[in-house]
Image (cartoon, rainbow, N blue to C red):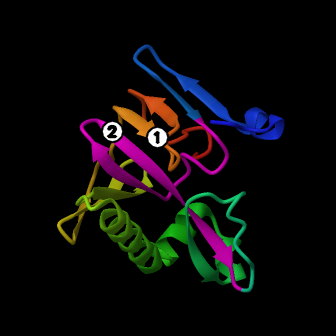
């Protein structure tokens, strides 16, 4: 992944005895979408909240977006934002998974990851809430650059 000097400084490197993760800005922060793109192969798509009237900066905020968010909501803690915007986040997630499936001509499974222990899994047009989230395997960004190998798919330093 080609990053400028500022992005390299902001990139978080995490390691354990079994693997590693390197999250550039915007990645590994709840909520996000995980697409299962192969056997033990996953793609992360960040979800950004955009204030009413603001334009989307696609270079800065790679991923997908929940738009027209009230400024009062954006001042809340991240967990509160996710709770308040839950229905919109679900809509965006379904749209992203269906769009990826349509353009790739493959039927993707996915997961909307809300926090460390809660995911809403999408399979065959249905969402199912579970008390676990995808982890391990090989995690890539949307450009297929490796973000993590055998590691959690979230940045625990940015989600406390």
In the image, is 111 to the left or to the right of 78? left
Could you say whether the residue bearing mark 1 is in a helix, strand or loop? strand
Q: In the rendered structure, are the residues bearing label 1 and label 2 in contact, judged by CB atoms less than 8 Å apart? A: yes
How many numbered dots are placed on residues in this image?
Answer: 2
User: What residue is drawn where x is 21% and y is 72%?
Assistant: 125
In the image, is 144 to the left or to the right of 26? left
- Check the picture and name the quadrant holding the C terminus: top right
Q: Residues within 10 Å of mark 1 (few under 14, many from 20)?
A: many
Residue at the extreme left of the image, as rendered: 124
In the image, is 106 to the left or to the right of 17? left
Main SS of the magenta segment?
strand
Whether residue 29 is in magenta: the answer is yes
Q: Position of residue 13 (x, y in %)?
A: 62, 28
Could you say whether the residue bearing mark 2 is in a helix, strand or loop? strand
Q: Quickly name the residue at label 2.
A: 41
User: What residue is drawn where x is 38% and y is 33%?
Assistant: 138
86 vs 76, nearest the viewer: 86
Label whose residue precedes the other's in the sequence (1 or 2): 2
């Amino acid at each position: 992944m080609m990053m400028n000097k500022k992005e390299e400084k902001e990139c978080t490197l995490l390691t354990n005895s079994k693997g590693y993760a390197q999250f550039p800005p915007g990645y590994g922060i709840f909520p996000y979408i995980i697409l299962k793109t192969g056997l033990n192969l996953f793609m992360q798509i960040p979800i950004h909240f955009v204030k009413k009237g603001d334009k989307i900066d696609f270079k800065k905020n790679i991923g997908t977006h929940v738009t027209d968010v009230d400024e009062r909501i954006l001042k809340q803690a991240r967990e509160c934002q996710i709770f308040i915007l839950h229905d919109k986040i679900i809509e965006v997630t379904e749209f992203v998974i269906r769009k990826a499936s349509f353009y790739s001509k493959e039927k993707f499974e996915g997961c909307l990851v809300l926090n460390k222990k809660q995911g809403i899994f999408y399979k065959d047009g249905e969402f199912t809430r579970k008390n676990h989230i995808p982890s391990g395997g090989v995690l890539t960004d949307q450009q297929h650059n490796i973000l993590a190998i055998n590691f959690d798919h979230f940045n625990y330093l940015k989600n406390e």
